[in-house]
Amino acid sequence: MARSGLSVRTGALSISTGATAVGALAYVGIVDPHRPGTLFPPCPFRLLTGWNCPFCGGLRMTHDLLHGDMSAAVVDNVFALVGLPLLAIWLVWRIKRGERAFPRPAVVVIVASAVIWTVVRNLPGFPLVPTLISQ
Ligand SMILES: [Zn+2]
C-alpha cells in the first residue's frame, strides 16, 4: 500500500517536473532572450560585477538551440552548451553504477572549470560574448 502510494507520488512528481521543463523550454523558445525588455531575470553576478558569470547567455544559447542555430549557441555560451550535457551523462553513468554523484575531485574540477571559464570569457577581446539584439 505504501509502496504504490510512493509510486503514484513519484509518478506525479515526474509528470509535473517534465511539464514544468517543457513549459519553460517553450517559453524560452517563443520569447527571444536576445531582446531587451523580456521577462527573463537579469543575472545577479553581472549586475553586481559587470562580468559575465559562467552561465550568462545560457537562456540565449537554449533559444538558439531550439531554433537550430548552433553557431549562435556556441557564441552565447559554449561552456554550458558542451559542459551541461557532458555533466548530465556523467552523472547518469555514476548513479547507474551506484556511485556517489559528486565526489570531491569532481567538484574541484567543476568549480575550477567554471572559475577559469568566467575569467577567460571576461578577458578583453574574447570573441564568445552573449549577444543582445537592440530594438
Ligand atoms: Zn550570469
Image (cartoon, rainbow, N blue to C red):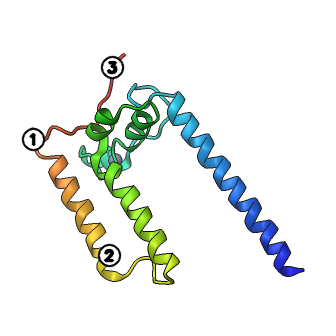
Q: Crowding at label 2, few (<14), some or many (≥20) Cα neighbours within 10 Å? A: few
Q: Are marks 2 and 3 in contact (CB under 8 Å)?
A: no
Of pointers 2 and 3, the one earlier in the residue sequence: 2
| Above-or-below relation of 112 to 132 | below
x 30%, y 33%: residue: 72
Residue at x 33% of width, y 57% of height:
83
The amino acid beneath tag 3 is Ser
Disc 1 residue: CB within 8 Å of ligand 1: no
- 135 lies left or right of 10: left
Residue 2 in the image: x percent, y percent? Answer: 85, 80
Secondary structure beneath disc 2? helix
Callouts 2 and 1 close, C-beta under 8 Å: no
Identified at 46% across, 83% down, the residue is 99
First of labels 3, 1 by sequence position? 1
Q: Position of residue 67 (x, y in %)?
A: 44, 30
Q: Which type of secondary structure does the marked residue at label 1 adopt?
A: loop
Disc number for residue 134: 3
Measured Cα–Cα span from mark 2 to mark 1: 30 Å
Q: Which residue: 15% across, 37% down? A: 127
The part of the image, by quadrant, that contains residue 114 is bottom left
Q: Position of residue 63 (x, y in %)?
A: 44, 35
Q: In the picture provided, is 47 more to the left or to the right than 68? A: left
Judge whether 45 appears above or below 99 on screen. Answer: above
Q: Which image quadrant: the N terminus?
A: bottom right
Residue 124 tag number? 1
Q: Amino acid at mark 2?
A: Ala
Q: Amino acid at mark 1?
A: Pro
Q: Which mark is residue 106?
A: 2
Foreground of the two, 123 or 60 = 60
Q: Nearer the viewer, mark 2 or mark 1?
A: 2
